[in-house]
Image (cartoon, coloured by chain):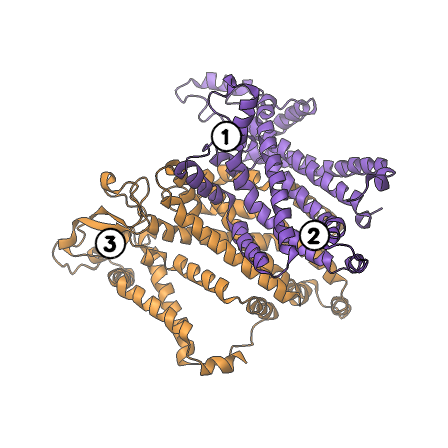
Amino acid sequence: MISSRTYAAQRRPILLALLLRLAAAVPVLVGMVIAVFFIAHILPGDPFAHYVSPTLPAAVAEQARRAFGLDQPLGMQFLTWVRHVLVWDFGVSYTTHQSVLSMISQALPVSLILGSSAFIVQVFLALTMALVSVHRPGGRLDRLLSAGGMVLYATPSYFFGILLLAVFSFWLGILPSGHWQSVDASALPPLVLFWDRAVHLVLPVAAIAIPRAAAFARYLRSSLLRTLERPFILAARSQGLSERSVIWNHALPNALMSAISLGGLELGTLLTGTLVTETLFAFPGMGRLTVAAVLSRDYPLLVGCTIVSGCLVIVANSIADVLHAALDPRVRTE
Amino acid sequence: MTTAQSRRRFPWSRVLALAALGSLIAIRWERFSDTLASMALTVGVVFTGSHETPGLWRWEHTQFWLATITLIVLLWLLARPIYFPRRPSTSGSASMRSIRLAFISAANARAALVLCVMGSVGLLAPLLAPNNPLEQGDLSSNRLRPPASSGWYQRGDSDVGVETADMVAQLQRVNLRLARFEATGDPEHAGRTEHLFLLGSDAVGRDVLSRAIIGTRTSLAIGIVAAFGALLLGTIAGLGASLGTTVVNRAVTWTTDVFLSIPSIFLVVALAFFVGGSLWGLIAVLVLSGWMRTARIVRGEMLHLREQEFIQAARLLGVSRIRLVQRHFLPNLVPVLATSTVLLISEMLLAEAALGFLGFGVQPPLPSWGNMLGEAITHLERSWWIAAAPGTCLTIFVLALHHTAERSEAGTRF
């Protein structure tokens, strides 16, 4: 593809660009933090509604409320909370009494593994589909893939997941229906544990990746077809390069460039935990943690989850932007 | 061109649609006539005004009024061009004309058919549904029945007794019958009645087909209202960002970025839980989480339009700002917005379904595609059919919307 030598001289500017891009994202991040905190706190609903028994004397309930700082005015609560967040302390969960950070650090790897493997599968599938389609545009295979891709693209991932579950897990009984490892996983030797987890990953990854791959393949296909019409492809062909070389060495790198920013967006949403899929497959990731936090009105946990995922989205987008700029000199704006 | 052709050709599609609606009236004649009776009696009771009648406007029976009125309007709309053929009108405001153009150029027979059929199913839902979507019947016989098997429902005896001349008593009886989705007032049919579960029944013995039909109405109503709300909010924000002062511009752009950076499903779930419960709360949540893209599109398009000669000419002529927006900006935004609205509807439907699936959406007794899918997963091991109907409907509808959006995009960018 693009040799690293050509861009080696620009490595520093790229890092600098990444830092600048991240710095530009800071105000947005601050706004998000404020918005999330106040949305969670202003809207009706009391975390103590089902935490403190209604039969408890009012004084005791008040004491518990004070222990969590919930008797303070909202502004003061916010300031206290910001002071703690600045030293990387998101507080203590109302429901489990664990620190929010430790809960997130347990859930995040699960989501990261699920999201990144889904992303890899998605990109691989999409590339395959797009390359097969482009091989003979308008041919039978291309039309079949386009039509099938359109249907898959319109299928919501939870419905697709339900179908996969019904077929592979309940009807055929060959894949586990949920959780990210077996119940007795802690007793398994490492290699078997790895296999166990991989088997548990198959259905959720398929449920996430296949509909998304269909969408991504549509984009890649049109991008590839557009690239193939450009003069430099004609030049490459007229030099007598093989069709394989034209597509792999000339068309694909150029077509992929515009796909990078889309990929960044996709990666961002995937990394933050695909809430619905995680719920469907009972995966203990960020998505389920967020749902649990919302259900129990666990403000610190909810705010922590949202901020961590928001940061991930912003970082993924920034990396995609900078990567795009690094690979494609035309989009650099100086 | 098309009018000349259609005048000569026999209007098969219209006649088929009319036949379908006519047979609907025939099949559901008792429900249809009960509704007409209910409307007439209500008018009578309101105008004589001598009685205190509680529950005159309960949703349980007014939904039938809406469906019946829609049915009559649909019949009229379909039949009118057959009896009074005329050329399509070219009147209307500039915006309306460009909306019409955008959609006519997007016309794709299959997608349009799907959208029209499912839209009509939504509008006529209470007349179409074979049974009350909330009725559970006898659990031991009705629970998790597979498709095309039968179960039993208890029929009321609301009509048992002598005819009474009292208008209020009659009205109450008709309304009760409607609210129970009961077709018959015949005392012979009171008691246990056999019911065919065409698409099976769910875990508490409710008819999946009826729930899917009523769910279509719920989901489509929420999706469409929320999409238009988001369109309105996004357009206002986009106009503000492009026409307002620098401060307004900055504020709107920043707010858009902030809302975009909160992962959308997290935002929706967090909001839905706190505001949720009511339908309007749910719609508000969907609007609040879906307006950003429209705002960006409008802002981008406005920045482009603002520099065009015709806008500058209008400005130099001293056209007021409001008139500029109304007469020059908005009609030119319509083609772009038409496409994004179609996509917005599909986004809203999917978001509503995801929320319902997680249990934050439409609250349980009322069916929607989303909460039917959510209820399905607990019994997926034994009964796949509960998820099949709503999931397929959702997929087909979204597919049709995407198809339309793609065409209209291609149509407006010639």
Residue that carries the numbered disc 2 in the rendered image: B241
Q: Quadrant of the N terminus of chain A?
A: top right
Q: Which numbered disc flags the more N-terminal residue, 3 or 2?
A: 3
User: Which color has been applied to chain B in this rendered view?
Assistant: orange
Left of B334 or right of it: where is B22?
Answer: left
- Per the image, label 2 sits on a secondary structure element best described as helix
Real-space Cα distance between discs 3 and 1? Answer: 41 Å
User: Which color has been applied to chain A in this rendered view?
Assistant: purple
Figure check: B2 above or below B272: below
Q: Chain of mark 3?
A: B
Disc 1 crowd rating (10 Å Cα; few below 14, some 14-19, many 20+) is some
Of the pair B108 and A39, the residue shown nearer to us: B108
Q: Position of residue B177 (x, y in %)?
A: 24, 54
Circle on res. B182: 3
Evaluate whether residue A179 shows in this view. yes
Which residue type carries mark 3?
A: Glu
Which residue type carries mark 2?
A: Ala
Disc 3 crowd rating (10 Å Cα; few below 14, some 14-19, many 20+) is many
Circle on res. A292: 1
Of the pair A282 and B127, the residue shown nearer to us: A282
- Which residue appears at 24% of the width and 54% of the height? B182
Which residue type carries mark 1?
A: Ala
